[in-house]
Amino acid sequence: MRILSVRFTGIDLERPSFTALIFFVFIITLFFTHSLSLAGEYHATSEETQTGSETLACSQCHTMHGSQGGQSLLYEGSGTYPKLLRASSILNLCKYCHGENNPGPVGWDSRTPPQIFNNQLGYIPSGGDFKDRNYANERNRHSVGTDVSSLPPPGYTGTWSDVTSKFSTEFNCLYCHDQHGNTNFRNLRYDPGNPANDSPTSPNRVEVTYAYNPSSDPNDNTKDVNYWGAGADTSPENKFTRTRVRFRRSPVDNDSPARGIAAWCGKCHVQFYGASGASNMGGTSSSGGVGAGDDNSSSSSPWIRHPVTDMNLTTATSNLHADLSNWSGVSGRVRHIDPDGTPGNGDDEPFCLTCHYAHGGGNPNNATDPTLDHSNLVMVDGSGTINLDSSYSTSSGRMRNVCQQCHNQ
């Protein structure tokens, strides 16, 4: 039945039929009285996910009437809001569970949502966080809460108004994540830069496959991401911890549909993503093979942007771009794709998250002035500690420490 797909998605308002509305009320009633067993990531239905067991009820984000028994069902304010939301904006709704003042362990499954906005749960979040030293939305990051109506992402080549009209002109979580769930890792949208392609059947989609295990590393190199551990309420080590998320499958130029984090980032940051030989990247065409890349054979094929898709440490060392022996000896390595599951050897590959945090990092500088921070860059101090760690030293923290892990110049 088509009515089963009725949703409140995006910002475009569609008035449901009376029949659909009655059916929606019925479904809400079921959610109040039953605990549904869902799979995959938290915001998802069993039909849309791959593995695991999660739960999410419509009533956690939406309210039919705004109050019940004389008590407000809103998380903030006193009025009613579009899309039947329980908060005044998409961002505020997300922050109710994922902000620093989240409700803690929640009653329907006794787990705590990850604190993505200024994490205070005692672990280093895999994606970073949006707030550092109580400063929110500083420059040079994915700045939630910022008016981005005239600020397309660096390297974007599409029609930005299509994105802002769908997800609001205020940059928020829905730009990257599907609030109703999908089969991608962390519910990443299939095409964040083009809502018309944001579909599990679109030929232009990007798939970010994953393997999850509640207790140990799945060790599955057929999936783009492996992660393991329980939820955020089991800090400091849980499935959201940086060290519990590993990137395994090597991207291939002729993947169809495209796969992996770098290809996903490239849907918005188009000019910064591509295989060797592409006009925006430089290098020598790899012709579908991993690691062929730039062979440094002539002055006509220099890299003009850092490779993120088809260059590994072995090839980079052979072509005099990198130092594999130095990389092998590094103790606190930055994020990388590790196809064989053994970090520190020649099949390791750099990608976007090698140098950047997905959400933002917080890079405390010697001047202790957050406005000077390029806050979604990974930085490493002299002892190999990353800048999200509380023991990070500003006196020896440098971006060059990240570069030196591979290049050792």
Image (cartoon, helix red, strand yellow):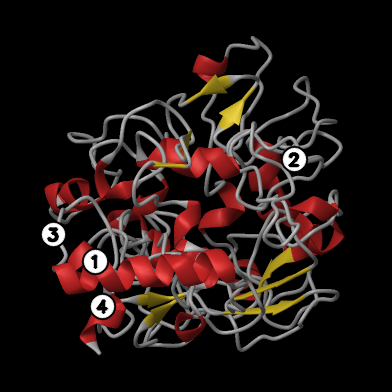
The amino acid at mark 3 is Arg
Asked whether the viewer can see residue 275, the reply is no
Q: Nearer the viewer, residue 275 or 324?
A: 275
The amino acid at mark 4 is Asn
Q: Which mark is residue 21?
A: 1
| Front label number (2 vs 1) | 1
- Upstream in the sequence, badge 3 or badge 1? 3
The amino acid at mark 2 is Ile
Q: Nearer the viewer, residue 156 or 328?
A: 156
Q: Rounded to the nearest whole Å, what is the CA distance between mark 2 and mark 1?
A: 50 Å
| Front label number (3 vs 2) | 3
Which residue matches tag 2? 386
- Upstream in the sequence, badge 3 or badge 2? 3
Task: State the SS at label 1.
Answer: helix
Picture mark count: 4
Left or right: 368 in relation to 144:
right
Q: Is the Cβ of the residue at disc 1 closer than 8 Å to that at disc 4?
A: no
Which residue matches tag 3? 15
Q: Going 28% across and 60% down the picture, which residue do you hit?
A: 8
